[in-house]
């Protein structure tokens, strides 16, 4: 009987990598374990591994498992891995095959409904990954993975930015609003899915932000502003978070979810916000040479286009 781990061993040096490298061929088994590892290698991807005949049959999925039936994701079949990989996590040294950080994203059991050389239909039973999926071969080592069944998340929003209405003075009911700086920059919505964002086509430095989200999905609203001579992306709203649309949620809920992300980097930051502080914020905007402030109603949903729930007040 051929050694199913021969290719796995040929790609690794036990003296250079902490990965498990069994010395003997695997024994046959009939377990039903699975693991999904988040792999920050040369490019971020997720490794799906299903136990089969004593090894973990593996696919690299660049965008992670599809969240809804309307989108298929590429899955590249890789070499079979040893069963010890069910619990492996750690740092594979740079320069070695698969060099980078690997963490366990989810693990559990699965039920195989069909298994052939070109199609694998299965049900995952994990904490983060669950539901019916099918892997089908398209060409060579390239497969696609499809989620079967009902929509597992809210649709990804395709919206225009919410825009403030200009007025000369702050609103009278100051406690009903949060006050932020008007940055005088260019608005930018940043969708993030599978550790990637289309906004990186124009701004390549956003790839680092997208990778930091891992498998978490999001749509961020912000503004490209020049601060201290440097271009900074200032985020002040969150429209979609981890599979759930926040468009109908009040500003206070969206703001709390945004702050929980703790976004801070060399090119981006979370904009400050001060509920009920119109006068001091407006004075600070004047002192910093900013065009004004934006008053945002605490109970307002996100309304694409011009809205009277957001008020721009010149400084």
Image (spheres, rainbow, N blue to C red):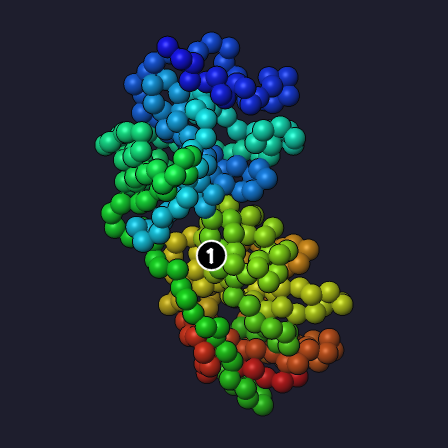
Of residues 16 and 310, which is closer to you in this image?
16
**Number of numbered labels in the structure image:** 1
Residue at far front of view: 139
Classify residue 13 as left or right of residue 133: right
Q: Is residue 93 among what the camera can see?
A: yes
Q: Is residue 260 visible?
A: no
Q: Nearer the viewer, residue 215 or 146?
A: 146
- Estimate the x, y position of residue 57 in percent, counting from the top left: 39, 27
Q: Position of residue 2 (x, y in %)?
A: 40, 13
Q: Which residue is mark 1?
A: 218
Residue at left 30%, top 50%? 69
Residue 75 in the figure: left or right of residue 294? left
- Quadrant where the N terminus sits is top left
Look at 45% across and 63% down and name the residue there: 239
Compared with residue 44, is residue 32 higher up or lower down, i.e. above or below?
above
Q: Residue at x 62, y 64 (%)?
A: 233
Q: Residue at x 45, y 46 (%)?
A: 63
Asked whether 29 or 161 is in front, the reply is 29
310 vs 88, nearest the viewer: 88
Disc 1 residue crowd, few under 14, some 14–19, many 20+, Cα 10 Å = many
Quadrant of the rendered structure where residue 61 is? top left
**Could you say where residue 149 lies in the image, as x and y percent from the top left?**
24, 47
Residue 133, above or below 225: above
């Amino acid at each position: 009987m051929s050694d199913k781990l021969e290719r796995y061993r040929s790609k690794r040096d036990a003296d250079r990598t902490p990965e498990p490298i069994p010395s003997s061929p695997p024994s046959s088994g009939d377990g039903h374990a699975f693991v999904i590892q988040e792999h920050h290698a040369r490019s971020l991807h997720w490794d799906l591994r299903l136990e089969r005949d004593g090894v973990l049959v593996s696919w690299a999925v660049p965008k992670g498992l599809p969240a809804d039936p309307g989108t298929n994701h590429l899955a590249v079949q890789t070499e079979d891995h040893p069963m010890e990989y069910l619990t492996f996590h750690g740092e594979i040294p740079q320069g070695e095959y698969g060099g980078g950080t690997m963490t366990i994203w989810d693990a559990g059991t699965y039920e195989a409904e069909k298994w052939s050389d070109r199609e694998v239909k299965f049900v995952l039973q994990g904490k983060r990954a669950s539901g019916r999926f099918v892997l089908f071969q398209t060409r060579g080592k390239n497969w696609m993975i499809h989620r079967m069944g009902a929509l597992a998340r809210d649709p990804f929003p395709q919206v225009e930015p919410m825009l403030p209405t200009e007025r000369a003075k702050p609103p009278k009911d100051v406690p009903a609003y949060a006050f932020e700086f008007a940055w005088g920059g260019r608005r930018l919505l940043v969708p993030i899915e599978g550790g990637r964002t289309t906004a990186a086509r124009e701004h390549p430095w956003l790839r680092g932000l997208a990778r930091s989200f891992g498998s978490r999905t999001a749509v961020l609203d912000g503004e490209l502003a020049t601060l201290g001579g440097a271009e900074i992306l200032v985020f002040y709203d969150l429209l979609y978070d981890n599979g759930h649309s926040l468009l109908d949620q009040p500003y206070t809920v969206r703001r709390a979810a945004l702050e929980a992300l703790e976004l801070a980097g060399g090119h981006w930051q979370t904009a400050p916000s001060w509920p009920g502080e119109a006068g001091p914020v407006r004075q600070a905007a004047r002192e910093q040479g900013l065009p004004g402030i934006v008053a945002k109603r605490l109970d307002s949903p996100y309304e694409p286009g011009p809205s009277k729930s957001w008020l721009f007040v010149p400084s």
